Image: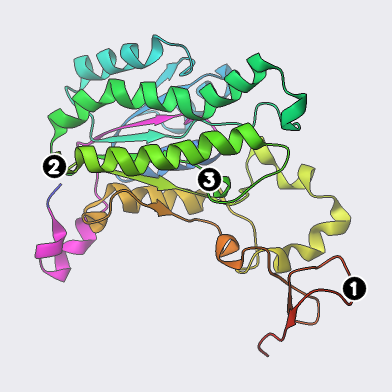
Amino acid sequence: MSDVSAQPAAALHTALDFTGKTVLVTGGGVGIGRAIAEAFAAAGARLVIAEIDPANAEAVEAAIPSARVIRCDVRERGTPRILAERIADQAGQLDVLVNNVGHFVHARAFADLAEDEIETILDTNLGQVLRMTHAMIPLLLKAGPGSSIINVTSIEAHRGIPGCTVYAAGKWGMTGFTKSLALELAPFGIRVNDIAPETTDTPQLALDYVIPPENRTHEERWIPLGRFGRPSDCAGAALYLASPLAAWVTGTALHVDGGALAAAGWYRTPQGQWTNTPLISGNGIVIPGMG
């Protein structure tokens, strides 16, 4: 892709054109990964999707006939090398790597986890990302300046989350990995960034299941922008980060969270005020809202 930063504004309409570019999305059969895959396909990319679930693989294959869907488990040690070989044979290079796979796996208190469960959580959320990225770097180098790595992390990479301590450790680790690798690859013109979403409505975290109906009326006050995330929110972020529009953006996190991290525990009350103790009437700091 050309650098649109030095071109007339009229060239900006071509910035999201990925025609002829090869994009790999791990876990691209459902949820955020599926939305990201669909967005790149719509933008003309030559799409490769790694998906473990047979039903999800079949569904995304039907939805995106042009995509190459590879049924595999990215956590298996040999999988990244196999994927790299297939991409090298078919495309010769990789322009965009989207490390999307991640999961809570075991949502329990840290003291209640077995050692093998701790290892599984870490490998799912960090280890496999390191191995996949390591395997794809030679192909990204072949693509040259303008190629990009996008890691889908979480808002939990920037705050604590009780009951998912090891998950958070993996996501925080990915943040450090992103920043450090961005420095190593910057001389080659390869950019590395994170997408860090707040709770997003996907089959993995279906809001209709995790939020009881009687609590749904509070949603507009839990998130500053008034709603939880949709997979399309992250898809738009991925297109931006992979495009020339983000040509001077590397080593950072794009917080797709509706303002949740900025709020840092502050919530709106039904009266339009802000409080940091929404469940304790009469206590905590209360700041008037607007309107």
Q: Residues within 10 Å of mark 1 (few under 14, many from 20)?
A: few
Whole-Å distance between the Cαs marked 2 and 1?
55 Å
Element on which disc 2 rests: helix
Image side of residue 256 versus residue 69, left or right: right
Pick whichever, 230 or 222, lies toward us: 222
Q: Are marks 2 and 1 in contact (CB under 8 Å)?
A: no
In the rendered structure, does residue 136 fall within the stretch colored magenta? Answer: no
Q: Position of residue 266 (x, y in %)?
A: 68, 69
Q: Which is more N-terminal, label 3 or label 1?
A: 3
* Quadrant in which residue 135 is drawn: top left
Q: Which is more N-terminal, label 3 or label 2?
A: 3
Image side of residue 208 versus residue 266, left or right: right
Magenta range is 3-30
Residue 53 in sight in this render: yes
Element on which disc 1 rests: loop
Q: Name the residue beneath numbered marker 3.
A: 157
Whole-Å distance between the Cαs marked 2 and 3?
26 Å
Residue 38 in sight in this render: no
Q: Name the residue beneath numbered marker 1.
A: 281
- Which residue appears farthest toward the front when viewing the image? 111
